[in-house]
Amino acid sequence: MLDPVKLKADFPVLQQTVHNGVPLVYLDNAASSQKPQIVIDTLSRIDSTVYANVHRGAHWLSDESTALYEESRDAVAEFIHASSSREIVFTTGTTGAINIVARSWGDANVNQGDEILLTRLEHHSNIVPWQQLAQRKGAQIKWCDITEDGCLDLEEFENLLSDRTRVVACTMASNVLGTFTPAKQITQLAHEAGAIVVLDAAQAIPHQAMNVLELEADFVAFSAHKMLGPSGIGILYGKEALLESMPPFLGGGSMIDVVSEQGFTTAALPAKFEAGTPPISPVLALPACLEYLTQIGMENIHQHELELASYAHAQLDTLGKVNILGPAPSEKAGVVSFTVDNLHPHDLTHALDNQGVAIRAGHHCAMPLHQRLGITASARASFYLYNTRDDVDTLVQAIDKAIRLFS
Ligand SMILES: Cc1ncc(COP(=O)(O)O)c(C=O)c1O
């Protein structure tokens, strides 16, 4: 098992006090995680030793930077068990990655009357690009519902698949309910129906081991800033044959082979999808995040969060007025969303912030899910490897105090 108290010491941000001396308890990890000192140091070392533009190859510094850039790609491929680094495209984030698929694969393969199957668990990033595609192409969006306890309704999912389904876009873990979806089964069923699968792994890859080959996923999208890394970068994994078949999304430098007045030819994978200067230092620092996570062990991280979520459920239940959304802890990631009787989530979050506890309130970029749940907003506490039982206790005490304050 991991030792969160020891790990927390690696994260300078978490050592702070806020609001004139209240210790910070950071429980907004589903939005963005924090960086350990090793990642901060790596970023700084890169900028003071090897920083130069990549793939320009005119001098030593650029060669060094390019080599590390490609080593980072190799490290990501290894981390998610991709069969080739050519299947790893650096993007701006999960949002950027999904937009590449919707624009490039979608425009080339989805036609009038085709169907795109989404689930009610999705983040807007895995909804709006598909709605835009459907608008461009005259395709139809279908929605797979959730069960009463907040799990994906697999029976309905199977029924909604048809020979018109071209794409299934599904989260691997809900950023609101925490629910893990049965990604392997989803992929198998979708493939049997002749559809491709786009997995939004933004809330999954930071918290559990990932094997894209075992999952047989066609596309997987995730963000570095939710897995101890810098913001501004994400990853699109795509099966090589699919990426090969797709036209480039953005045009510009780096994604071309030859440009003439008459037109252009595209670069080989994965450069074809990496137009322009990428976020160089963040990409070069990514292996430091992956090594840190690997050393701790993804299974240990998953178990730790499961334990924290179970503890949080039990403690919140003692307050009586807290309604936890979603399934039992065994079915979900370390995300606990809830409402409190007669207390708006924004008022609650504000009261918690005054006590140093950072959680999030609102629709969490999942309005259709909140509509399905019959609420407009919820409060969300989300855990990571450095959170402790003491953090959960502080959260629960702060909520208790807020309830008494507002009643
Ligand atoms: C499930 C899910 N998908 C997609 C995103 C979007 O990620 P990004 O803002 O890094 O593109 C998020 C971010 O919160 C998320 O939780």
Image (spheres, rainbow, N blue to C red):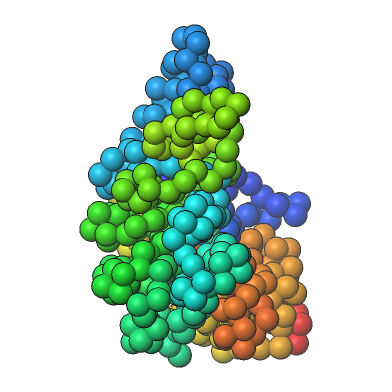
Residue 195 in sight from this viewpoint: yes
x%, y% of residue 216?
A: 27, 59
x%, y% of residue 14?
A: 57, 48
Left or right of residue 383, residue 363 in this image: right
Quadrant for the C terminus, please: bottom right
Quadrant for the N terminus, please: bottom left
- Tell me: residue 319, above or below residue 213: below
Query: Which residue is located at x 57 percent, y 85 percent?
Result: 372
Query: Which residue is located at x 51 percent, y 71 percent?
Result: 112
Q: Which of the two residues, 219 or 3, is positioned nearer the viewer here?
A: 219
When asked about the image quadrant of residue 22, the answer is: bottom right
Q: Which of the two residues, 65 or 357, is positioned nearer the viewer here?
A: 65
Query: Which residue is located at x 47 percent, y 15 percent?
Result: 57
Q: Which of the two residues, 192 or 152, is positioned nearer the viewer here?
A: 192
Instruction: Work out which residue is located at the far top of the displayed protein and give it.
Output: 59
Residue 284 in sight from this viewpoint: no
x%, y% of residue 74?
A: 33, 35
Q: Which of the two residues, 403 or 119, is positioned nearer the viewer here?
A: 119
- Tell me: residue 124, above or below residue 91: below
x%, y% of residue 388?
A: 46, 60
Query: Which residue is located at x 41 percent, y 69 percent?
Result: 166
Left or right of residue 266, residue 132 in this image: right
Marks counted in the figure total 0
